[in-house]
Amino acid sequence: MAVLIDTLKAAEIMESAGFTEKQAKAVIEAFAPAGDELVTKSDLTHGLTSLRQEMANLEQRLTTRIYAAQVATVIALIGILSFFSRI
């Protein structure tokens, strides 16, 4: 989501803080293109929620694969022991 910045108000705030008009204009011009890349707290919260869900899904898939590998290992060991016990 794009964040709109009131550039006139920002320039006025900078000027009241001691910036010259030229300095305030330069700062606004430097940061104005970044407006499309700024995110809101809501954007971050949504992203964090999505990331947590993806991590939970990944954890579940990995746990399932680890258990499957353990079961396969036990079955293979039983097969090997069974084979050698007949010799």
Image: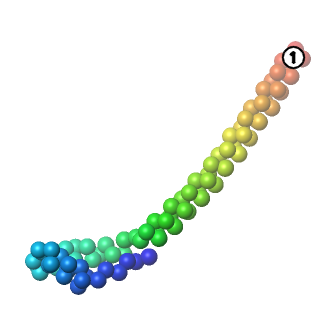
Q: Residue at x 83, y 27 (%)?
A: 79
In the picture as drawn, the residue positioned furthest to the bottom comes out as 8
Q: Is residue 53 above or below residue 15?
A: above
Q: Label 1: which residue?
A: 85
- Left or right of 22 in this view: 54: right
Query: Can see residue 26?
Result: no
Name the image quarter holding the N terminus. bottom left
- Left or right of 36 in this view: 7: left
In the picture as drawn, the residue positioned furthest to the front comes out as 16
Name the spot of residue 49 as percent of width and height, x first: 54, 62
Query: Can see residue 10?
Result: yes
Q: Residue at x 24, y 83 (%)?
A: 9
Name the spot of residue 81 as percent of width and height, x first: 82, 21
Q: Is residue 66 above or below residue 43?
A: above
Q: Of 74 and 31, which appears nearest the observer?
A: 31
- Left or right of 60 in this view: 38: left
Q: Residue at x 85, y 22 (%)?
A: 83
Name the image quarter holding the C terminus. top right
Q: Is residue 77 above or below residue 38?
A: above
Amino acid bearing label 1 = Ser
Q: Of 42 and 66, which appears nearest the observer?
A: 42
Q: Residue at x 71, y 45 (%)?
A: 64
Name the spot of residue 42 as percent of width and height, x first: 47, 70
